[in-house]
């Protein structure tokens, strides 16, 4: 294992620690189902309709998850940066192809496990059931936040939330991808940013 | 406990059986956190913004879950009939008020547990962690199906899916509530039903 890989597994260990109290032996079992994978900037890891059921942990870099509509329009669903999990657990449970695509926005390093391998651990030890529960709850919570944002917030609130929740990402994600995530046009996003900058300037004056 | 209540707890036992292999003692622990509650037709069990975190099992009757937009428009999110679970697990995890309301469309009998009580069981025995995992996965799968339907299907497909997935509900749910669930107007739904009936008639002729 390279030094970089050792560091990535260490990141995964830190990420799962609050969710399940794993012994060293259990951690070794968990680590064994994850494989290291890299994606170059702009690579597509998944396209809508693929029958892939993988649990992903981003070690380094940035992914965007997007929907593709019938007329070919993409809508960004989520940005997943380092130390974050992602996975189509709902689609896996239903044995359906994934509905979204995944593209790397930066050179990205991932740890990837099939959900089948992950589910295989549930019968090995109850600690893995707990980990699975926490992961599913976390995915539910993330979906909940996204649904709230889309349903209840104005574009300007959504933008400010994006900035505060994804600190640092505003500089890393192209503007047109942020606009697509917010559900507005790039022109509207520019206007919104100018208005917010003006308002901050007026307050400071 | 009344005969009806005994039957309701039996329904709950049957519903959780595929998810977790509970001993009699564990089942007793689980049953103890659920309370029987009734709602009369048209009663509101929850309104958007309530800080309620309950896990609900419908024993008899029918609930509709709805969103309320800023301009007062309601959009039906789900219909939950007998032998089905519902609960704002995502909102609970985030400690947020619920975003939706719940209204009984028929006289309804429920078994209700607070999520706090449910979570209290997780440290009692691993079987409850497994039950919690399965419940969270099931909720994720339901959200996944709903998102797919809204994103990918035409209104006519959505209606046919509703009819096949909710067999019997078409007769039980008022047309305007079905239209709101499908994201179309009541007039469009009538037109759609006439077109489908005509097409079935043409095929039969």
Image (cartoon, coloured by chain):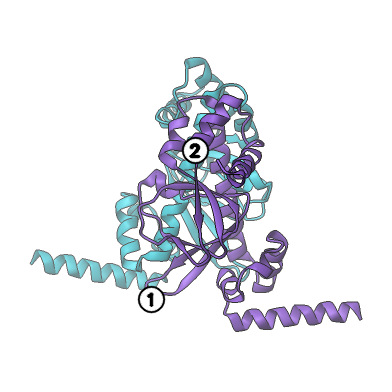
Chain colours: A cyan, B purple
In the image, what residue occupies the spot 57% across and 80% down? B185
In the rendered image, the vertical position of residue B157 relative to residue A6, given as above or below? below
User: Between residues A193 and A128, which one lies in front from this camera angle?
Assistant: A128
Crowdedness near tag 2: few (<14), some (14–19) or many (≥20) residues, C-alpha within 10 Å: many
- Do tag 1 and tag 2 residues touch (Cβ < 8 Å)? no
Is B63 positioned to the left or the right of A80 in the image? right
Q: Quadrant of the N terminus of chain B?
A: top right
* For residue B76, above or below residue B96: below
Judged from the image, the secondary structure of the residue bearing numbered disc 2 is helix
Q: Residue furthest left?
A: A205
Q: Could one spot residue A111 in this view of the protein?
A: no
> Which chain's residue wears label 2?
A
Label 1, secondary structure: give it.
Answer: loop
Q: Which residue is mark 1?
A: B71
Task: Identify whether B44 is placed above or below B88.
Answer: below
Q: Position of residue A107 (x, y in %)?
A: 47, 44
Task: Locate residue B68: give its quadrant.
Answer: bottom left
How far from the left and from the top, in percent, is residue A10?
43, 26
Residue at 38%, 65% (x, y): give it.
A152
Q: Is residue B49 visible?
A: yes
Q: Chain of mark 1?
A: B
Q: Which mark lies nearer to you, 1 or 2?
A: 1
Which residue sits at x=71%, y=78%? Answer: B193
Q: Which mark is residue A135?
A: 2
In the picture, the disc for residue A22 is: none
Residue B182 in the image: x percent, y percent? 59, 70
Specify the farthest residue to the front: B2
Distance from Cα at disc 1 to Cα at disc 2: 35 Å
Crowding around mark 1 (Cα neighbors within 10 Å: few <14, some 14 to 19, many 20+) is few
Residue B147: quadrant of the picture: bottom right
Q: Considering depth in this image, is A10 or B56 the residue closer to the camera?
A: B56
- Indicate the position of residue B169 as horizontal and vertical percent values: 66, 64
């Amino acid at each position: 294992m390279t030094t970089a890989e050792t560091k990535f597994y260490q990141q995964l260990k830190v990420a799962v620690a609050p969710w399940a109290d794993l012994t060293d032996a259990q951690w070794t079992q968990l680590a064994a189902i994850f494989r290291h994978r890299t994606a170059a900037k702009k690579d597509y890891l998944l396209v809508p309709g693929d029958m892939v059921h993988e649990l992903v942990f981003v070690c380094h870099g940035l992914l965007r998850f997007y929907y593709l509509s019938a007329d070919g329009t993409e809508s960004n669903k989520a940005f997943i940066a380092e130390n974050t999990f992602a996975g189509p657990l709902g689609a896996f449970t239903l044995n359906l192809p994934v509905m979204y695509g995944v593209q790397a926005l930066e050179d990205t390093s991932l740890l990837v496990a099939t959900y089948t391998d992950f589910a295989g651990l549930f019968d090995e030890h109850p600690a893995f059931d707990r980990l699975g529960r926490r992961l599913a709850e976390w995915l539910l919570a993330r979906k909940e936040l996204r649904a709230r944002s889309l349903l209840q917030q104005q574009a300007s609130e959504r933008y400010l939330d994006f900035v505060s929740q994804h600190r640092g990402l505003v500089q890393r994600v192209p503007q047109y991808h942020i606009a697509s995530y917010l559900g507005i046009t790039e022109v509207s996003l520019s206007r919104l940013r100018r208005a917010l900058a003006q308002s901050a300037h007026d307050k400071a004056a």
